[in-house]
């Protein structure tokens, strides 16, 4: 198949087939999970078709018209990095969906579960292959939405809802920041295309020289960091563990959290190569790596330990991508990409083990578990191998990428200390070793806490625990096979996946040689040191955890969660207070506020303008005012004002209404003087009708209350009215200063066309009926809606009376 | 519009209407809205007089034919979606028909809203026994 078609089908197939699941469910019932796994497998095969092209160094590229008016198209770009992520997503997808067949109870709402899994997978594949920032943002937020639905899958549990909301607020909020960064990138480079910018040295030098560069970098990195739970944004990931375990394995260890890392890799050619890149990306990564590894100690839930370890491992990736700069690509990029693949294998396995243990032993609390190795021998072996790979024990794949990590930290340390001086040559490797030590310690704790030691006799754990059924075990065993295979034959993944990804995004990259045995090198010594320190410190594991607990109890505000809760929980009361201030009460206040604001809007520019031109307020009156008027005009105007005053001042309703209708008829008289006979006729009809309605209503409203009008209030209202009056007069006097060119009236268009196009001689009628016919339909609808409203308002009363409520 | 006294009248109507809208009595508020809507309509129609026309925009047949015979000043082609550019107005003797057409709609919709608001007022009085806006707010809380 044409590789471009394969990419497009792989992205859209999950979206399309997800909607057929409810139908398929009625046929296949519980076997629906296998159907979803089959869909994921199809995507995997489609993705694999692109590998030959990426290995040959010819990325697949193509686009569709999408929103041509906005200059947007759907761009797809399949290079090595994209294929690597797509293979991880679809491959882990197959494993997770198969595993779910054993994990999910048949009583669950299975179509909904698999539907969201598939939609999520499609969105992730979209992120992998997208080549345009707008499209990237859309798929990015789609993953946030689908993960929100999946974390909150058990809707009735408040913890699930809390975790889902938290994840959504943080990741989708970060996505919005990223979007702002993308827009700035577009402002600087003039294009939405990602590979277009990455491959144009001209655009890149423009970007790096631009004052917006740091803003672009920070905003995009904030998006990536929130998605990958880096820095202070890590808090959503532990709460996301409320999701079903296969979902955690899929989203929160293997795929979605990688999206941020993937974005950093994708942006690497565009943004890297500056001190800012090193500081933000690897600085955040290093701090997160050590902090999260350390905080993992006080967790007691297996999945929470895994969550913190995921945060820490993702920080490894961030750090390594940060180390790698455009001028000195070094090994960082390749090491990070290799670790990305390895992390997906061992962390997904560990999550699957956690699911098995929770499923069989009915608890995930590590204090209640222990000594399960005899009862669950197969699970035990799987867990040991995965944990050893995470800890970096040879000859597993985790060892290889950790060696590369140590090597890059040595490299970058030397580079930085050569450029800037200082103890950096020592600091970078030391931080790396610290991260490794913590990883080793919680890896040991996982195996030790669950499988070693003696059985605790907790009443939550059943007496007889046995190994998982093959449906759940087989996926884990398969992943362990990969761990060992990648460890023993690193040439295969490196040549097929890592090298194409590396060389596609880092030009002039040196070819990679990864082998188990390099001889005695500094990284190997660092590994040995890591093991030695880790094993010694492991004795103090529990006391460190106890110290952390007491520390947190003493200083609760030190935790980011404390601030998150403070902000989110107080949002509603603060909104109430805000509303109480801005919406205090009677309508009169709003009207006064609006009017005062409008007065300000009119007078402030006039004032500023007149100052600028050296005009006094008295000069606001234009020169050529026409004071000429016929005597009958003056009489008409006086009568109108008298009528309006009567409507305003007469205390009883009936005289006031009569006065108002008198004003209406005078207005229609004025229309005749203004050469508007159609208006005059309409006005007479309408005025008659509305007077009748007024009087009908007046019959039902007795004038029971006399409004008290204290002098102060009258003064304020008179002042406002006077200012409104004066404002209107000033605007109208200046309205005839001259017709500006762009605002020339086009009435003569209608004059010219009326007879020719419609055969009508009355131009006003022709406009209303022919030229603006749709407007008139709208007007009639307004009339009918008002009539319906009146009818139902009156009827609602009648029903209540019949119901006997009053 | 270059007629000072008409402008003054409209401005005063605006002021009186505003004064009424600020009252607490719901009936008075509705009357105020009525006055303001008259003022707005007059304002717009008055704007149409600035072309200094003296004739009502109803064509005599001869005039229209004469216009046709003079040759169209608009070379528009509706099937192709092309409208001719705006050129200088040869019809200076007519009052602007466009503002009249706009106001015609406004008058009719004004009737609809007046009727609706009045019915609302009537129902409010029935439900709460008062049409004092402040009193209503107090009752609702």
Image (cartoon, coloured by chain):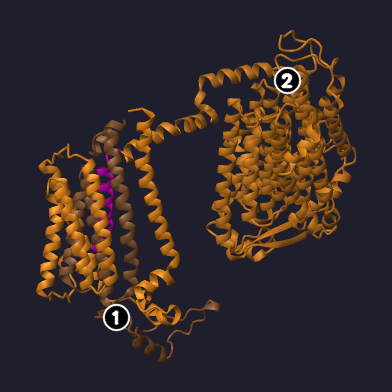
Chain colours: A orange, B brown
Whole-percent x and y of residue A394? 85, 32
Distance of label 2 from label 1 (alpha carbons): 97 Å
Residue at 74% across, 12% down? A461
Is label 1 in a helix, a strand or a loop? loop
Residue at 72% across, 17% down? A539
Residue beneath disc 2: A538
Residues A428 and A133: in front is: A133
In which quadrant of the rendered view does residue A430 lie? top right
Label 1: chain letter: B
2 and 1 marks in contact (CB < 8 Å): no
Whole-percent x and y of residue A428? 68, 39
Residue beneath disc 1: B94
Callouts 2 and 1 in the same chain: no
Q: Give, as a single range, the part of the protein colored magenta.
A: A584-606
- Classify residue A664 as left or right of residue A103: left
From the viewer's perspective, is residue A181 above or below residue A639?
above
Residue A591 falls inside the magenta stretch: yes
Label 2: chain letter: A
Badge 1: residue crowd in 10 Å (few <14, some 14–19, many ≥20): many
């Amino acid at each position: 198949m044409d590789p471009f078609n394969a990419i497009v089908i792989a992205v859209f197939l999950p979206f399309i087939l997800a909607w057929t699941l409810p139908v398929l469910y009625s046929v296949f019932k519980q076997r629906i999970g296998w159907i979803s796994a089959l869909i994921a497998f199809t995507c995997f095969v489609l993705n694999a078709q692109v590998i030959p092209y990426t290995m040959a160094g010819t990325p697949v590229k193509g686009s569709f018209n999408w929103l041509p008016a906005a200059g947007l198209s759907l761009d797809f770009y399949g290079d090595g990095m994209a294929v690597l992520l797509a293979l991880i997503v679809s491959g882990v997808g197959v494993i997770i969906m198969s595993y779910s067949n054993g994990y999910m109870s048949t009583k669950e709402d299975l179509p909904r579960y698999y539907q969201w899994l598939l939609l999520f997978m499609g969105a992730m594949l979209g992120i992998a292959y997208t080549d345009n920032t707008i499209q990237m943002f859309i798929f990015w937020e789609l993953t946030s939405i689908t993960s929100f639905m999946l974390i909150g899958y058990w809707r009735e549990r408040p913890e699930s809802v809390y975790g889902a909301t938290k994840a959504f607020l943080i990741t989708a909020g970060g996505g919005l920041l990223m979007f702002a960064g993308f827009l700035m990138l577009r402002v600087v480079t003039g294009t939405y295309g990602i590979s277009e910018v990455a491959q144009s040295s001209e655009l890149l030098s423009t970007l790096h020289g631009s004052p917006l560069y740091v803003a672009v970098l920070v905003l995009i990195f904030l998006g990536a960091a929130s998605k990958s739970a880096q820095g202070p944004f890590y808090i959503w990931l532990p709460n996301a563990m409320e999701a079903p375990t296969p979902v955690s394995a899929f989203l929160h260890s293997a795929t979605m959290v990688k999206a941020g890392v993937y974005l950093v890799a994708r942006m690497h050619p565009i943004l890297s190569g500056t001190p800012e890149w090193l500081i933000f990306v690897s600085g955040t990564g290093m701090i997160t790596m050590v902090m999260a590894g350390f905080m993992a100690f006080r967790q007691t839930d297996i999945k929470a330990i895994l969550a913190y370890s995921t945060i820490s491992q993702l920080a490894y990736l961030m750090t390594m991508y940060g180390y790698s700069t455009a001028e000195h690509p070094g090994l960082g990029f390749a090491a990070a990409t290799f670790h990305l693949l390895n992390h997906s294998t061992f962390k997904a396995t560990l999550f699957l083990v956690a699911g098995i243990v929770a499923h069989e032993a009915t608890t995930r609390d590590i204090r209640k578990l222990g000594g399960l190795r005899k009862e669950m021998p197969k699970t035990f072996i799987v867990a040991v191998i995965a944990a050893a790979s995470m800890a970096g024990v040879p000859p597993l794949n985790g060892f290889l990428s950790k060696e590369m990590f140590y090597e890059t930290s040595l490299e970058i340390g030397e580079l930085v200390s050569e450029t800037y001086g200082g103890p950096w040559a020592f600091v970078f490797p030391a931080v790396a070793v610290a991260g490794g030590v913590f990883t080793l310690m919680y890896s040991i704790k996982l195996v030790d806490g669950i499988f070693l030691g003696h059985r605790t006799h907790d009443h939550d754990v059943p007496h007889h625990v046995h190994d998982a059924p093959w449906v759940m075990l087989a996926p884990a065993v398969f992943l362990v096979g990969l761990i060992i295979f990648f460890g023993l034959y690193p040439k295969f993944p490196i040549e097929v996946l890592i090298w194409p990804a590396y060389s596609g995004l880092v030009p002039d990259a040196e070819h990679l040689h990864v082998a188990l045995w390099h001889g005695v090198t500094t990284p190997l010594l660092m590994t040995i040191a890591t093991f030695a320190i880790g094993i010694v410190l492991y004795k103090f594991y529990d006391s460190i955890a106890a110290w952390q607990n007491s520390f947190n109890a003493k200083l609760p505000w030190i935790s980011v969660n404390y601030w998150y809760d403070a902000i989110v929980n107080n949002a509603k009361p603060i909104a109430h207070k805000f509303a109480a201030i801005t919406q205090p009460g009677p309508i009169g206040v709003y009207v006064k506020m609006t009017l005062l604001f409008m007065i300000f809007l009119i007078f402030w520019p006039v004032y500023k303008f007149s100052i600028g031109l050296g005009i006094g307020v008295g000069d606001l009156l234009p020169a050529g005012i026409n004071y000429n008027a016929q005597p009958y005009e003056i009489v008409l105007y006086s009568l109108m004002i008298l009528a309006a005053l009567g409507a305003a001042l007469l205390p009883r309703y009936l005289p006031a209404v009569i006065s108002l209708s008198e004003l209406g008829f005078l207005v229609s008289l004025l229309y005749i003087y203004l050469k508007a006979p159609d208006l005059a006729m309409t006005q007479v009809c309408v005025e008659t009708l509305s007077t009748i309605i007024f009087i009908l209503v007046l019959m039902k409203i007795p004038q029971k209350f006399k409004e008290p009008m204290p002098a102060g209030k009258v003064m304020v209202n008179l002042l406002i009215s006077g200012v409104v009056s004066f404002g209107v007069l000033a605007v109208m006097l200046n309205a005839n200063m001259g017709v500006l060119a762009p605002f020339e009236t086009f009435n003569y268009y209608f004059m010219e066309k009326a007879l020719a196009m419609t055969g009508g001689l009355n131009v006003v009628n022709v406009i209303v009926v022919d030229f603006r016919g749709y407007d008139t339909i709208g007007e009639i609808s307004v009339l009918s809606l008002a009539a319906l409203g009146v009818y139902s308002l009156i009827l609602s009363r009648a029903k209540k009376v019949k119901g006997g409520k009053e | 519009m270059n007629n000072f006294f008409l402008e003054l009248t409209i401005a005063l109507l605006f002021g009186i209407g505003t004064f009424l809208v600020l009252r607490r009595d719901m009936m008075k508020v509705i009357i105020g809205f009525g006055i303001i809507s008259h003022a707005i309509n007059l304002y717009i129609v008055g704007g149409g007089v600035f072309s200094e026309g003296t004739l009502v925009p109803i064509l005599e047949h001869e005039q229209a034919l004469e216009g046709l015979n003079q040759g169209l000043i608009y070379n528009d082609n509706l099937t192709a979606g092309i409208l001719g550019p705006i050129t200088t107005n040869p019809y200076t003797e007519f009052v602007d028909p466009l503002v009249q057409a706009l106001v015609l709609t406004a008058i009719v919709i004004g009737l609809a809203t007046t009727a609706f608001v009045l019915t609302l007022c009537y129902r409010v009085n029935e439900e709460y026994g008062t049409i004092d806006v402040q009193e209503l707010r107090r009752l609702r809380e």
